[in-house]
């Protein structure tokens, strides 16, 4: 139990800016095993986003509350996944060889593709959340409970989609100093089962409201499939930035898919 807590806190330290005990560090062995808790981190991030939205809506309009909830998610993770998304936009937008793409993605500066990509991403995230929250008033439960499940499901499922690429594809960089390299070194059935359990459980609870919500798995994992295939084609696998981009895109796909499903249920 103590070991599992250490692995979880390693995941919490790596994927968020939430303070952890001083004895938690980037030990490769624990970091490698922390992938099993990546979707569970989504519960925490999604919960913080919802709580920020819920409290902000008491004081402000829904639109402002949504923006503040997005900001809360960015602050919680330190824009970890958004940064990866921007790097992927720059790398795959400006590079035409594996070496060039990887070099651009490693550059800390953001280019035109990354800037445009983030603008479009946040516009889609804001508008899809607005539509989702307006529709949640028809939920079978209290809208607040429904929104909580939606926020957590979006963050956990998108993280499952991202980390599953680690289980099916090879790490592309040969640089041993890469921050994400320890995660890609190996995995066991514990990582696969743990990530799957924590990734799907919130959606299972959400499906008790309407079983059709389970259909969101199709567009999310179809998106994951094509992103992974695209990464494989151009760089022969994935990088940490690719995982961050997958999480962000799949999160938005979740919001859009639920919004579309709600019109037919």
Image (cartoon, grey):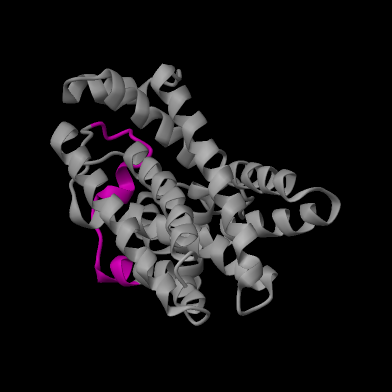
Q: What x and y, as percent, mark residue 227?
A: 26, 44
Residue 149 lies, in percent from the top left, at 57, 69
Q: Quadrant of residue 148?
A: bottom right
Q: Which residues are magenta?
A: 175-193
Residue 163: tell me if it is visible.
Answer: yes
* Residue at screen point 43% across, 79% down: 211
Q: Quadrant of residue 77?
A: top right
Q: For this view, does 55 lie left or right of residue 127? A: right
Classify residue 174 by image quadrant: top left
Give whichever of 1, 243 is nearer the camera: 243
Location of residue 15 in the rendering, given as x and y in whole percent from the top left corner: 49, 49
Q: Is residue 176 magenta?
A: yes
Q: In the displayed structure, does residue 77 sit left or right of residue 38?
A: right
Which residue of the protein is positioned furthest toward the right in this rendering? 59
Relative to 204, is 5 above or below? above
Q: Residue at x 27, y 35 (%)?
A: 176
Any part of residue 7 in sight: no
Q: Relative to residue 254, is residue 236 depicted above or below?
A: above
Where 206 sits versus 186, above or below? below
């Amino acid at each position: 139990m103590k070991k599992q807590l250490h692995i979880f806190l390693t995941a919490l330290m790596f994927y968020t800016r939430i303070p952890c005990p001083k004895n938690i560090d980037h030990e490769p062995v624990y970091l490698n095993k922390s992938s099993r808790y990546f979707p569970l981190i989504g519960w925490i991030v999604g919960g913080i986003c919802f709580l920020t939205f819920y409290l902000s809506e008491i004081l402000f309009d829904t639109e402002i509350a949504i923006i503040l909830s997005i900001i809360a998610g960015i602050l919680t993770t330190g824009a970890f996944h958004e940064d990866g998304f921007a790097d992927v936009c720059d790398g795959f937008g400006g590079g035409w060889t594996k070496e060039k793409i990887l070099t651009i993605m490693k550059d800390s500066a953001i280019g035109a593709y990354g800037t445009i990509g983030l603008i479009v991403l946040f516009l889609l995230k804001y508008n899809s959340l607005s539509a989702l929250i307006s529709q949640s008033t028809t939920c079978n439960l209290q809208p607040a409970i429904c929104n909580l499940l939606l926020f957590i499901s979006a963050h956990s499922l998108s993280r499952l989609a991202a980390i599953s690429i680690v289980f099916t594809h090879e790490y592309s960089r040969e640089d041993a100093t890469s921050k994400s390299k320890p995660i890609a070194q190996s995995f066991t059935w514990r990582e696969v089962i743990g990530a799957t359990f924590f990734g799907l459980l919130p959606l299972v609870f959400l499906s008790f409201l309407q079983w059709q919500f389970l259909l969101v798995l199709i567009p999310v994992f179809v998106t994951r499939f094509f992103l992974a295939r695209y990464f494989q084609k151009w760089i022969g696998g994935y990088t940490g930035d690719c995982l961050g981009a997958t999480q962000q895109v799949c999160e938005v796909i979740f919001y859009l898919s639920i919004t579309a499903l709600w019109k037919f249920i």
